[in-house]
């Protein structure tokens, strides 16, 4: 049975991480909108910023999971558990990589068009 205080701490950690993800995603939005990204790309910007914020957090989680695996005792059950956690993080990262591809390409194309003067 999970101790109520540990559940509360875990929830607080989850909320704190969600805030950090949102702040990172918002920073992407602010940067690109301040640079003049047109409203016609807002749907792509929303997807891109959310995916980048989540990838940023997932990279940190994956790093922590790898450290936990390397520090774990030489127990095959523990290895299996750590590998399952790493697989879940890798799957999450893969989903976001797939999700952001179109939006990343569209915004990068817009950036290059603006850089070469081929866009309004």
Image (cartoon, grey):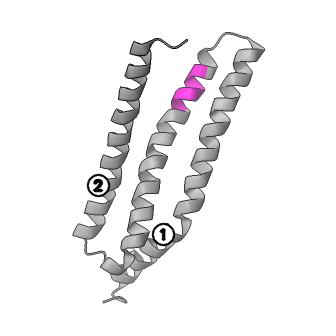
Q: Quadrant of the N terminus?
A: top right
- At a point 47% along the width and 75% down the height, the residue shown is 106
Residue 65 on the magenta segment: yes
- At a point 55% along the width and 35% down the height, the residue shown is 62
Residue 28: image quadrant is: bottom left
**Residue found at the very far right of the displayed protein:** 76
Residue 77 on the magenta segment: no
Task: Compare residues 36 and 112 and report the one nearer the observer.
Answer: 36
| 76 lies above or below 53 | above
Q: Position of residue 5 (x, y in %)?
A: 39, 14
| 114 lies above or below 92 | below
Q: Quadrant of the C terminus?
A: bottom left
Query: Disc number at residue 64?
Result: none
The answer to whether marks 1 and 2 mark residues whose Cβ atoms lie closer than 8 Å is no
Real-space CA distance between mark 1 and mark 2, rounded to the nearest whole angstrom = 17 Å
User: What secondary structure is marked by label 1?
Assistant: helix
Q: How many marks?
A: 2
Of helix, strand and loop, which mostly describes the magenta segment?
helix
User: What secondary structure is marked by label 2?
Assistant: helix
Q: Position of residue 41 (x, y in %)?
A: 38, 76
Would you call the spot at circle 2 few (<14 residues within 10 Å), some (14-19), or many (20 or more)? some
| Image side of residue 40 versus residue 71, left or right | left
Pointer 1 residue: 103
Residue 66: image quadrant is: top right
- At a point 38% along the width and 41% down the height, the residue shown is 18
Q: Position of residue 31 (x, y in %)?
A: 27, 62
The stretch in magenta equals 63-68
Pointer 2 residue: 27
């Amino acid at each position: 049975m999970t101790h109520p205080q540990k559940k509360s701490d875990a929830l607080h950690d989850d909320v704190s991480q969600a805030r950090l993800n949102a702040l990172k995603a918002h920073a992407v939005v602010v940067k690109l909108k301040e640079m003049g990204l047109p409203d016609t790309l807002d749907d792509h910007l929303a997807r891109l910023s959310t995916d980048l914020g989540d990838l940023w957090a997932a990279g940190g989680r994956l790093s922590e999971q790898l450290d936990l695996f390397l520090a774990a005792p030489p127990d095959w059950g523990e290895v299996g558990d750590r590998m399952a956690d790493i697989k879940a993080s890798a799957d999450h990262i893969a989903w976001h990589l797939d999700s952001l591809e179109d939006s990343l390409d569209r915004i990068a194309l817009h950036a290059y068009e603006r850089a070469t003067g081929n866009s309004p």
